[in-house]
Image (tube, rainbow, N blue to C red):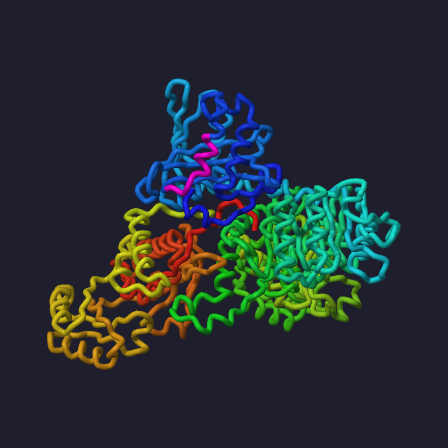
Amino acid sequence: MTDDLLDRPTVHALLADGTTVCIRPVLPGDRGRLQGFYEEMSPENLRLRFFGPSRRSAAMAADRACAPARPGYRALLAEVEGRVIGLAEYDSGGDDGGKEAAEISIAVADGLHHRGVGTLLAEHLVSAARAAGITTFTAYALSENHEVLRLFADLGLRTCRRFEGPEVRCTIHLDQDETYLSAVEARGRAADVASLLPLLRPSCVAVVGAGRTPGSVGRAVLHHLRTGGFTGRLFAVNPKVSSVLGVPCHPSVAALPATPDLVIVAVPAGAVPTVADECGRAGVRALVVVTAGLDHTQAETLLTACRTYGMRLVGPNCLGICHTDAGLSLDATFAAGHPRPGTAGVAVQSGGIGIALLDGLSRLGIGVSSFVSLGDKYDVSGNDMLQWWEGDGRTDLALLHLESFGNPRAFSRTARRVTRRIPVLTVDAGRTDAGRKAAASHTAAAATRTMTRGALFTQAGITATRSVGELLETAALFRTQPLAEGRRVAIVTNAGGAGVLTADACAEAGLALPPLTPAMTGELLAVLPDGAALGNPVDATAAVSEAQLTECVDRLTRYSGIDAVIVALVPTAVAAATGDDLVRAVTATPGRRARPVIAVRLEQDQSVRLLPAADGGTIPSYAEPQAAARALAHAAGRAAWLARPAGAVPVLDHVEPERARTVVEDYLTRESDGGWLDPSTCADLLASYGIPQIPWAWAESEDEAVRAADRLRGFDGRVVMKAHWPGLLHKSERRAVHLDLRGDAQIRAAFRDLETRFAGLMTGVVLQPLAARGTELFAGVVQDEVFGPLVLFGLGGTATEVLADHAARLAPLTDRDVHELITSPRCAPLLLGANGNTPVDLGELEQLLLRLSRMAADLPQLAEADFNPVLATPGGVTVLDARIRLLPRRPQDPYLRRLR
């Protein structure tokens, strides 16, 4: 036990069966409980743990774990409702900073094997060891101790075994690679889904707070449970009445004839903590708290009860939950009506948005598989629901409205996996960020909330919309049509004006309208009436018949030159007189069409409808061309994301993270509050990650400046001088730079000028050779407290903020991410060799961004890094000016399994 370990907070996590367990450092006061933990073990379990049956081992093990703090030792225990069920320890035998290997041991209480206790403790101990600089665990076990040997083998870490007589020596390498993260993720997914079963598939439900007052929330939830098809046992808790809506009432949860799996809490805020504690003591497994207005103390007490007794929690301040499986229907909401059963999973933080989505999905006929109103999101989150939908066997479309993210990096990993199986759509809520107005560096100013969330959604493959209406419009297309494999669209219309509006909407949405080939034009001429205009849009004229339009649409869907067809229709007297129904031309044979077909009907009274098709399917129809074009653009974006390889984080050479950590620790020892690094420290940090810098020298006097310039003139003969003082960020704005200096006289004059104008501020100057011509770029990173490090890239120089030509991705960057980061800004053609110019060295540019990403991922203390300008030429990439700000922050493992 060490002081560092004691500083680590107590966390809660899930075992394989969904049970909540507390994991925390061992404290001196735990000695008696730990000795009891060992003494309750069977002789065989003790023999396997201590290689002998001695009962004295229990006292000795408890003494060791609870001894005074000593370097290199860690001990974590797992407990459920105060009972110790597991212990994990490692000992490096000395100072953490000097030992890279440690011996590990794990013990689990009798009767609790095969529930993931030891594995979960091992994961947390691995995370603590990595933070302490330990790279390898060794473990000794008897060869017949198959369970512990399997535990180490199944962790997902590279493990080697060596037999030494009756013992096995296991060496476990603690590299956090994709294999390990995937193994942790799979274990977490199984545990998470198990923990949600009492919430989403309960067999017994109680409502606390249901009364006789019409319009009360508790009564409304009880009514929905009674009338929504729930076939399990249903109770109400109200000490003042005998029954509500025909449901028998009981005075308390403890007085119920059976223990509910799920309790809906609809009592005043002050009573919520007491009800939660009572539920926990009774053995309830899940709570939905619809009550709003809890103060900080009430909220903390509620969550403590849920963690102590192992209850999953939805809310507080929520609309409720529902589930529509046949035979397992559950509607525990106070929405206006019951949702239509279907295949869309919905999770929202806003109850109002939840009602709008339930209504819209029901109206469209898509319906919902399960709905969770997350409310204030104390526990159950969007990440939990994605994992539930991934394996529920029904959900084929996920809709999210999330105002906040508890662990965006874990969410991103989950979403990347899930969205390869089902579309995940979201309303991008909370796009503004007024607090950025005070941002200091170029990087911080560019890292808007919209950009940060956009990076998360883009990398995870989530389709982000800007409104509830757009979300429903896109869901209608995703649910009914094959994805458009590209952005090429053909428009067919019976009215030229409608075609023009639709063409404008497509262009604004980033879709292309390619001209039709002569062969395709000939085919359409043969089927359309005289006077048809065969451009793109195709104006079939008001004289087009149902049969002609059907044949036209069918031929276009077989045409390889486009990816989707939009049919823009207006009602005409001509069609009415002939009895033609042009809408039937759109819905006639959708099952035989290889490409998506959608309709635009300007007279339509709803923003989107699903038209019944002849083959039993449906076709989306939009009232506005803009809605149709946006939905198609989202479909094309999803298809492109699915077609791309998943990407991997490349292994980099010449990277020295331990050297970098030493640089950071030394600086923060001197500057406990953090700050902007001086040029020398900044250069050391960049060198630790192999980030190329232009040669430079430091000077604090005229004479030193002249000598430094002499050393640098060998590169070109001309030098640049930049003033420096702590906190100076925008040198050009302060006119703190002299360019193109030649000869000693100019060097001395420039130094005196800076020294005079910045007297009392300037601590010295940086001299550099004048850089060659090239493209000036910008690269940076900002450490978002919620999302983690965000890497930004774009056009650089003094106008970087004015032009705002930036793209962003969250670290760690994969090879796919870095390619997209370079090609996303408007300046990308300059880098790729536009207008016959030679491309810059793209390989070196990718390396720069990957190394910046690695530095940010390794060093949580790195608050901001600002490389501006970065000079890119065909011959290489060089950082000309770098600023880095450090803050005292503890490292956190974003992938460690723990509840919010």
Pick the quarter of the image with the N terminus.
top left
The answer to which quarter of the image holds residue 361 is bottom right
- Residue at (11, 74) in percent of width and height: 743
| Along the viewing direction, whichever of 875 and 181 lies nearer the viewer | 181
228 within the magenta span: no
- Residue at (61, 47) in percent of width and height: 307
| Along the viewing direction, whichever of 454 and 293 lies nearer the viewer | 293
Q: Position of residue 642 (x, y in %)?
A: 52, 50
Taking the image as shown, residue 519 lies to the left or right of residue 816, namely right
The answer to which quarter of the image holds residue 674 is bottom left
64 within the magenta span: yes
Any part of residue 547 in sight:
no
Question: Magenta segment, which residues?
Answer: 60-70
Q: Position of residue 182 (x, y in %)?
A: 49, 41
Taking the image as shown, residue 828 lies to the left or right of residue 732, namely right
Taking the image as shown, residue 716 lies to the left or right of residue 126, namely left
Q: Position of residue 448 (x, y in %)?
A: 47, 67
Q: Is residue 375 above or below residue 730?
A: above
Identity of the residue furthest to the top in this view: 165
| Along the viewing direction, whichever of 272 and 715 lies nearer the viewer | 272
Q: Is residue 191 above or below residue 470?
A: above
